[in-house]
Image (cartoon, grey):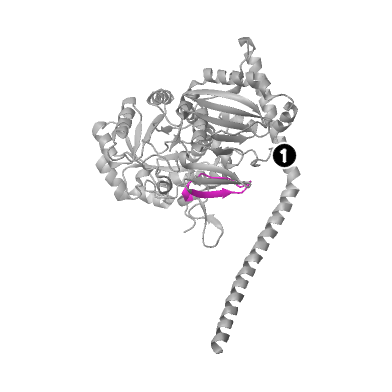
Amino acid sequence: MELVCPAGTPASLRAALDAGADVVYVGFRDETNARNFPGLNFSPEELEESLKKAHDMGRQIYVAINTYPQAGNLEPWYKAVDTAARIGVDAVILADIGLLNYAKRQHPGLRRHLSVQASASNPEAINFYRSAFDVQRVVLPRVLTVREIAELIEEIDVETEVFAFGGMCVMAEGRCSLSSYATGKSPNMNGVCSPASHVEYEQRRGKLVSKLGEFTINSFPNEEAAGYPTLCKGRFVGHTGDPSYLFEEPTSLNVMMMMPELIQAGVKALKIEGRQRGKAYVHQVVSGYRKAIDAAMKGEPVPFMDMGNITEGTRSTAGAYEKNWR
Amino acid sequence: MYDKNVPSRVLPFTPMLFAGFMMRPVPAFSLKPIVKHVLTRMKKLYPEIFSRLAVLGNTSFLIDPTDLPYCFCLSVKEGETHIDIWDDDSDRSGFQAVISGPMLDLIKLLEGRVDGDALFFSRTLNVEGDTEAVLTLRNAVDSADVALADVIGVPVPFMKPGFDKLFSKVGSLFGNLEKDFVTVQRSVLHPIARHMGEVDKELDRSADRMRKIDKELVRIKTSLKKSQQSVERGR
């Protein structure tokens, strides 16, 4: 079982490697990746230096180029693929079929993974990506139960990578337009869900009020844990007059205790979300998951590790993996 | 954008709060050379931070350690970063963003020992104003492995091992004190929190009763209206 960990900066990458990551995934400092936040990500020079360090330690680096190229402006995406290939990264994580085709044609030796942003969750879709673009691995959306994942693996000839910890995205990934409805920018095209330029926090009568564009999306009383300013985790006033969460409460995904089932299902890699988080987060989560994987692979019980201090809303869930609401 | 008349914070019960009481007679201007020395050293040791900050253009941050009687003004002007220290009651207008929280947590954040989002989720850290600028600053600082002991530095190299040891001792002393303060705070606040919990429950029950009364009132009014209409029709 491979542990795939996030890094938004070279310091986070070092933290991930020191904590036991098998692979670190990163993005370039532009709109070609789905974590296009200010001050984050890697320049080609930083990536080159980081790749040398990772390879010296016997580890790997994947590069996410997983937003959808804009019509009439394909160059940044082509350039990102070319740069990743020139530097010699171990794989690129792509979502767009045009870009997959470009990478296959221009750099046939460059390993291609299908991003979660492609939202491929059934055998027909995944087998198509395999036959058309020779993808070696698919990152599955966070909408399947462990049993569904096991059944899917039986029907495909591609490695699977699943999210294990971090942001709990409840939408159809790669197809969510909530953020662009409110701000004109989306994670799919611009690499930003709730872009910071449109987010505002205010202290109002002892409450923390979060706003996205023109919309007030939450109001946290003092002492209540806060969450990210995303519309899918907004608290809205319905016809009952009481504000409540419409889609999902602020919470993080954590499937550490389901590790034996995921191994049994035949999952090849576990992915930690959070390139936008600090190196302290990266170190804590990666260390915890390293211990958990090592224990589970030896057939030992997975030790309980409290991650409450770094989760959104200080809560976590196994989400769709156990789908206990059905 | 920052209104100092709005009480947006509760002073945290920390060792720094008491250190701050003792430092109150020390005016901010006397600390300026130390603060400027820290920034100069950081620029020398961690240039990557400042190259990531350059994209900000002209932005000024108010960094407010809520348990100290001072605040810091960090500004980026045409790619150059500057810092100043002010007394807590100075004019705070004109800042694009305000970051406030206990001093020890701000130091941990600077050294990358704690995750900024986690501090925000737990409401330890408060952010107001230009969120994009705050994120840029957070990401820039997190891009380097900052060690405060190296930043402060020692005048003569042979003293470094002793200095590092002393720095680490002071750090763990403050860490332990911080835990003790949390314990004391919990013990003191527990009975009050329990009482407040009961008051909250009673308020919820009262709100429920009020809602039921409101519904009943609407029902009575409707029924009264219908009765009046049937009386009028009968005339």
For mark 1, give the secondary structure: helix
Q: Nearer the viewer, residue A286 or B224?
A: B224
**Three-letter code for the amino acid on which mark 1 is drawn:** Thr
Q: Which residue is mark 1?
A: B183
Left or right of A278 in this view: A31: left
Q: In the current view of this chain or complex, which residue is farthest to the bottom?
A: B235
Q: Is residue A248 magenta?
A: no
Left or right of B33 in this view: B137: left
The stretch of residues the image draws in magenta is A215-232
- x then y, percent, for residue A84: 34, 29
- x then y, percent, for residue A145: 43, 51
Residue A304 image-quadrant placement: top right
Residue B39 image-quadrant placement: top right
- x then y, percent, for residue B159: 64, 12
Q: Quadrant of the N terminus of chain B?
A: top right
Q: Nearer the viewer, residue B222 or A324?
A: B222
